[in-house]
Image: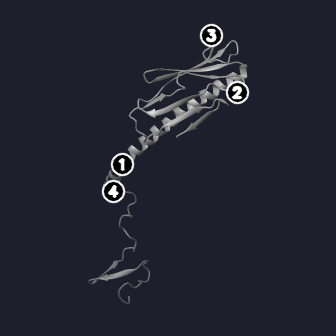
Amino acid sequence: MKGRGADIKGVGGRWVVVGSKYCRRLPTTDYRLPTQQGYTLLELIITMAILGIAARFMLPGIDDWQTKRSFRNLVAEVEQDIFGAREQAEALNTTTRLLTTRLGDSYTFTVFSSSVPTAVCNAAGVWNQVSTRTETYPTRFELTGAGVGNVCFYRDGTASGGVYTFQQKDGGTQYGNATIQVTVATGAPDVSGL
């Protein structure tokens, strides 16, 4: 043997001198635990706290966005009711009337057609109900204007005209105000203010 760590013939492996004895050297593998992967509980708690604080500031913006979207949907639905009444007049070759009534926050949109074509919106005669739809508006909004009541559409594509005004009951504008003007010459709705 020539010193520390020398090979001894006939015996496999490496040997070292410890004091006056020869001892087998342990393999040089690392017996430490492998590096931990993942997050500690403290890191997860801090992350959740930060997300909670951020969400608290974002939620009012999301609520406003949903209210604005709801407002735009209400306007679009009334616009579709106007188009539907106008198309009924042309398809049935008669006069149709879009009657809008209100009970609290509920609005009912009913389309009637006359049995005999007429040029007068409130003419006497038989009016047949074609369709009806009831919509309950959020308490923030209301529908007013000269169109609320009767708007008539004639078989030649014209209309009696009317204005539907959508607004907030408190007079504010943060969610929007909109107007649908029913054009007399064409019977088409013209939306403004969105």
Q: Give the residue at the far top of this rendering.
A: 125
User: In 3D space, how far apart are the residues under numbered discs 1 and 4 (Cα atoms)?
Assistant: 22 Å
Name which of mark 1 and mark 3 comes first in the sequence: 1
Q: Are marks 1 and 3 in contact (CB under 8 Å)?
A: no
Residue at position x 46%, y 23% in the image: 106
**3 vs 4, front mark:** 3
Q: Disc 3 versus disc 4: distance between alpha carbons?
A: 77 Å
100 on left or right of 57: right
Name the amino acid, label 4.
Glu
Quote the CA–CA distance across marks 3 and 2: 21 Å
Disc 3, SS:
loop
For the residues labelled 1 and 3, the Cα–Cα distance comes to: 58 Å
Labels 2 and 4: the sequence-earlier one: 4
Q: Residue 124 — which label?
A: 3
**Going from the N terminus, do you reach mark 3 or mark 4 first?**
4
For numbered disc 1, what is the local secondary structure?
Answer: helix
Q: Nearer the viewer, residue 30 or 49?
A: 49
Q: In the figure, is residue 111 to the left or right of 13?
A: right
